[in-house]
Image: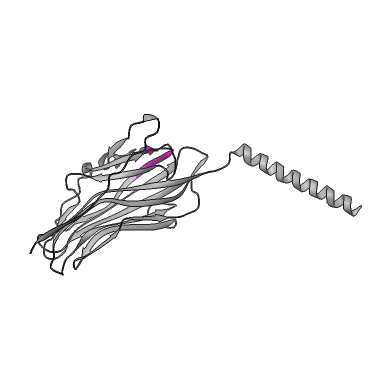
Amino acid sequence: MKKLLHSFVLTLALLLGSGAQAVSISLFDLLQPGGSIIAGDKLMDNWSLTFQDKSDGTLVNTNNILVTALNDGGMDPGPGLQFDILSNEFLVGGNGIYAYLDFQFGFRVSVLDPQKRIKDNSLNLLGASLFHAVDGSNDLGSYILETIGTTAGASDLGSKDVSFDVLDDTQNAKLTDSANFAPQSAIWVTKNILVWSTDVGDFAELTSFNQRFSQTTVPEPGSMALAMLALVGLGAVRGQRKTAVAT
């Protein structure tokens, strides 16, 4: 049976303000004590590998996962991260039963600018491929589930997922998703990645994804104080008017 290659690949244009160079760090380095990366006014730290499992018993080489800061000067849609998986690290070949890679990690995102808050975020699938026979019985693909919370591993601020897969010769693609939540000075992100393939000779691979953290600005303390004084003054004026009318 003839084999078909289904692929989805996007090239991401990095918007680098003031000629700044993009910063890229391997996930291996980020997982070390004190590992962190900065994108715009956002600090991503407290990285942890919380779970990994592969049907062939091997471990993921986190040196082959490159994390790049998307620093566009803080303009909409906000700073973010791109993840590129190198050297076929997330390539899974079918074994006739169910071959898979299950990988989960997390990190914290916090603001460096006290006038900024994190408001909503997005997840985007940029690169994936599927190689399979057209025989009506295939099952393979890539899937990312992401949760956002106020503490590590929590999902109280929302969740999102993206995927690219084929089931019984029907291709399915959900390439972007987003979560909306109230402004936060820090959030915790947890990503669960699953790549799987069933039939011998079939292959699925995840190669790239990114995410953005939208943001909002909060008033400076001085501005808030002035606003409160203005409201108090307005209330006093209204009170004097009511008194004058009563008199």
Q: Is residue 228 magenta?
A: no
Q: Main secondary structure of the magenta part?
A: strand
Q: Is residue 39 magenta?
A: yes
> Residue 6 location in percent, x, y?
19, 56
At 20% from the left edge and 59% from the top edge, which residue is drawn?
196
Tell whether 78 sits left or right of 241. left
Q: In the displayed image of the protein, which residue is found farthest to the right?
A: 247
> Residue 110 location in percent, x, y?
43, 43
Instruction: State which quadrant residue 81 falls in.
Output: top left
Instruction: State which quadrant residue 163 falls in.
Output: bottom left
Q: Compared with residue 42, is residue 238 higher up or lower down, i.e. above or below?
A: below
Tell whether 111 sits left or right of 84. right
Q: In the displayed image of the protein, which residue is found farthest to the top?
A: 19
Tell whether 116 sits left or right of 243. left
Which sits in the foreground, 115 or 61? 115
> Residue 150 location in percent, x, y?
44, 52
- Image: magenta residue range: 38-46
